[in-house]
Image (spheres, rainbow, N blue to C red):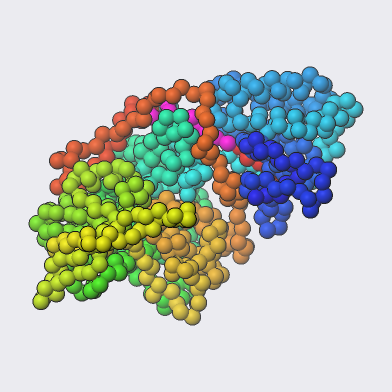
Amino acid sequence: MSKVYFSNWQGEIVDNRGKSVDDWAEASAKFPINYNKELSTKAFVGWDGFALFQEDVDVVKLALNYARQYQEYSEACGKCTPGRWGGQILYDMLDKIARGEGQYSDLDHIKEVSSTMTTTSKCEIGKTVPVPIVGMIESFEDQFITLIEEQKKSPWYDLEDDKYIANVTAPCTDMCPSHVDIPGYIEGVREFDFENSLKATRSTMPLAHVCGRVCPHPCEDACRRANLDEAVSIMELKRIGADYETDHELEWFHPVKPKKPRNDGKKVAIIGAGPAGLTAAYYLGLEGIAVTIFEELPVLGGEVAVGVPEYRMPIDKYNKDIQLVADLPSVEIITNHRVTADRLKEIEEEFDATLLGFGARLSKAVRCKNERPEINGYWGAISMLDKVNLWHKYRIGSPASEDLKGKTVVCVGGGFTSMDVVRCSIREGAKRVIMLYRRDEKTIIRNTTLEEYTEAVEEGVEFIFYSAIEEIFTDENDNLTHMLVNQYELVPDPNGGRAQLVKREGEDMTIECDYLIPAVSQALDTQILPEDWNLEMTSWNSIATNGKDYMTSREGIFAAGDCEYGPMTIVNAVGQAKRAASVISRYIYDGKITLTDEEIMEDHMNRLKVYNKKEKITNWMPGLPREVSEKLETEVRKDNNKEVNLGFTAQEAAAEAERCMRCYYLGMVAV
């Protein structure tokens, strides 16, 4: 809720003109009333209307500057006349009125051009920019009429007292934790301009091979195309540019030209060479800032390398993402370097800032009777996946098939890690693989993806829903033999609250098995953190930050990824690390924690919510089917680690890219 002077956002009119501030009604939208800790906001203008937070806002100048921002920030593709020239006409007419040279006919002209833009522009930014401008003319017509009748300038026309800050986003971009310019890279695919496609991705996401394959793609949940037919296959289109670059052995397509090493004595330490660490190093390295990554494992890539199976994320592709970072001249990576609490203290003294980016690599317990790690056959998910992937990707260790072939494996979980466990167990030759999950099929799909779940079922994984282990049983040699499993049902709350899981009495079952692999979640190994630092921790024992600049409670120590939030997706870790790197790049020089205007606006627009799931899409042709990439047949893939998803052909990718509606939206604040 936001207290406003006037608002017409999404058709909700809140008009407090003539009332005292204490009596102002509130708007339901979460407007950015405070830009940051120092500045209040005078007004917000965006795709769905506008809001004024003070009485003395010059609405004419506000409309003029929104039209100006469209010229500066517009992502219009230039393929339609309304989008390309309509905004220029709006700006010219508003400027004419604001400088005291307007006529009544200019208001009619603005409305006519706005109507044309709204109904005929090909992209969403061209359709929506006129909306708040027309709204301001209709709701505050007296301000426009006065300037026309008296042929005088707007009182604030020549003053520079107001600051106008704008940002362009899209529903998919807004939902993406890394704020990837999704319509931008899709446009590159559509035009077969794979270089610009990849540059658009790498502006905020350096791990294009990875996130084009194993991202949970929350962006697709906010794709406006789904309001019409089906969401665009956003994730798979991301890998097109990356595969093009590496398959053709081209020079790196950086979003900006990397700067030469600064050699100014400033340097940053990063603990962990996983997605968070690599991302922070990349964006600091592009700025020429000296970075050293300390990695405990003998290989780079973190949990994506040793946890995500080869059939989902081929290591040769991931190694290209890693090489992209390692090739930056100001980046140094040291492997086989375990950072202890004492070593972390030394690093803090040696470096100007330190980013903690280590993963959560301790498997949590199932919490059943007789659960003991020393049981023969009890195997933590992280340890199990380490063995599988270190062997298949690096030939380190020995094959997990020596342990699992011909065995019965039970995994407890319901997320990506558990999916990796059961599908790897199939490939390692287990004769029977079962996943127990306390919730239902819909929830496990929501936790992972429909593709992951479908492929696991096809490969022979058995899913037993609404189930949980009560007790583990062993023989005289402490070998796992079987387990008692309770079954549950979801019972609605008669008072309308959350439905509860209730045990189904008399329906327990016994499952004989050789291995139990808990994959319910992972925990952070906090031994790395010096006790005398007294770092503030969250309730789930991860390192607390404010979630915006990623500084911990100890000055100069930052955290991102799993160690900041707990086990999270790759794209979340990347998004946090990108922001942390940005903050660090300024902090090491001025000692201040600041966000850029773009980052502040990203946060404001995210709270406001760009995507409207109930929106009815018009003026688009429905029925363009979503392209489906080729997958290896089940019998071909289930006993090996060949990549399952073969990706789009160039023609399929272009056809899928055509389905994107370019839903760019422009938001602006006046401060």
Residue nearest the viewer, comparing 75 with 288: 75
Circle count: 0
Range covered by the magenta-colored residues: 656-665
Picture residue at 53% right of the left edge, 67% below the top = 552
Give me the residue at 27% from left, 50% from top.
315
Q: Which residue lies furthest to the bottom in this view?
A: 532
Residue at (70, 29) in percent of width and height? 134
Looking at the rendering, which quadrant does residue 185 occupy? Answer: top left
Residue at the (26%, 37%) spot, across then down: 646
**Image quadrant in which you'd find residue 526:** bottom left
Residue toward you, 101 or 116: 116
Residue 304 percent coordinates (x, y): 32, 54
Residue 663 is a magenta residue: yes
Quarter of the image holding residue 336?
Answer: bottom left
Q: Name the chief secondary structure element in magenta.
A: loop
Q: Where is residue 5 in the image (x, y as percent from the top left)?
A: 76, 45
- Left or right position of 22 against 557: right
Q: In this view, does 174 lie above or below 147?
A: below
Residue 354 appears in the rendering: no
Q: Residue furthest right?
A: 150
Q: Nearer the viewer, residue 342 or 66?
A: 66
Examine the rendering and report whether any part of residue 590 can be seen.
Answer: yes
Q: Within the magenta stretch, is there residue 424?
A: no
The reply, left or right, for residue 661 in relation to residue 210 is right
**Position of residue 130 measured from the top left corner of the image (x, y, whole percent):** 66, 29
